[in-house]
Image: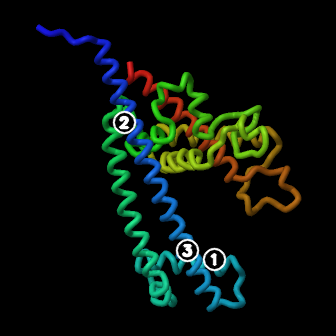
Amino acid sequence: MDTVDPGSQIQSSKVDIDHACDLLREHHRNREDIHRAEKAITLRIKAKCRRLCAATMPEASRKKVKDEADKLYKSMRNGAEHLLVREALVVCDSLFAARRILESRRKDFEKDMRKVARTLPVHPWAVATRGFGELGLAQIVGECGDLSLYSNPAKLWKRLGLAVIEGGRQRKVTGADALIHGYSPSRRSVMWSIGDSMVKASPSHYRDIYLARKELEVEKAKAEGLTVVPAEKIPKGKESDYRSQGHVHSRAKRYMEKRLVRDLWSAWKEASK
């Protein structure tokens, strides 16, 4: 009876993972290109809404015009009543049609990404993680490739823009520090969107992590002598005495995202043994 060389099985498995990572990288890039085009069209539609509203509200403040334009945009999306909706649809109809085409193509790529993600050894862990799932896994692999190539979670954090660099948050900087930070806004945006989805997934393990961290961030702010309030309630000139609720949210969300990436890295390592 023929025997199978274990080494050939390992090599075949490695090739399969490499192929899956290559496919996800390409699908992800195509999806991101289309998604950016979708967002550009959405911004163009909203700009048209603001112009229409501004023409009928010459004395209104910019904020009121923007708020009314948001209502107009939503009315075109969900059929709600608005005095300008018919006029807006006339000037925006072709833009909506173009966006529908892009949306359909983006969903095709997302379907392909989910299909490839199902071939990865860590897939069961991903689908069991509420708020994450196949698309989240596919996006991270599309940005980072084979996670087993990262010797520790910290290197994966840096790839995704979540690292701590010289005591501060990894961010976009200029000059020589740009090489040290190695920050990519597009990669950080992917992780931000995944984190946003997971914060909203309730009940879930990672939402609990977020909420617990949020409470801790509030306590830390108080220990520093700061008052936590909504950003709009911070008096001008007194910013150093306050910490905004948005800042607290961002810190807690970032912490949760790092925990997710760390756990994904560990699950990938375990599943690839």
Viewport quadrant of the C terminus: top left
Between disc 1 and disc 3, the foreground one is 3
Dot 2 alpha-carbon crowd within 10 angstroms: few under 14, some 14 to 19, many 20 or more: many
Distance from the alpha carbon under mark 1 to that under mark 2? 44 Å
Q: Which mark is residue 66?
A: 1
Q: Which residue is mark 2?
A: 20
Distance from the alpha carbon under mark 1 to that under mark 3? 14 Å
As shown in the figure, which amino acid type bears the numbered disc 3?
Arg
The vertical placement of 161 against 95, above or below, is: above
Can residue 67 be seen from the camera position used here?
yes
Between disc 1 and disc 2, the foreground one is 2
In the depicted view, which residue is nearer to us: 82 or 35?
Answer: 35
Under circle 3, the secondary element is: helix
State the image quarter where residue 49 is shown: bottom right
Q: Which residue is mark 3?
A: 44
Give the x, y percent position of residue 132.
Answer: 43, 43
User: Residue at 49% across / 75% down in the picture?
Assistant: 74
112 displayed left or right of 141: left
As shown in the figure, which amino acid type bears the numbered disc 2?
Ala
Give the x, y percent position of residue 84.
Answer: 51, 89
Under circle 1, the secondary element is: helix
Which numbered disc flags the more N-terminal residue, 2 or 3? 2
124 displayed left or right of 87: left
Give the x, y percent position of residue 268.
Answer: 43, 27
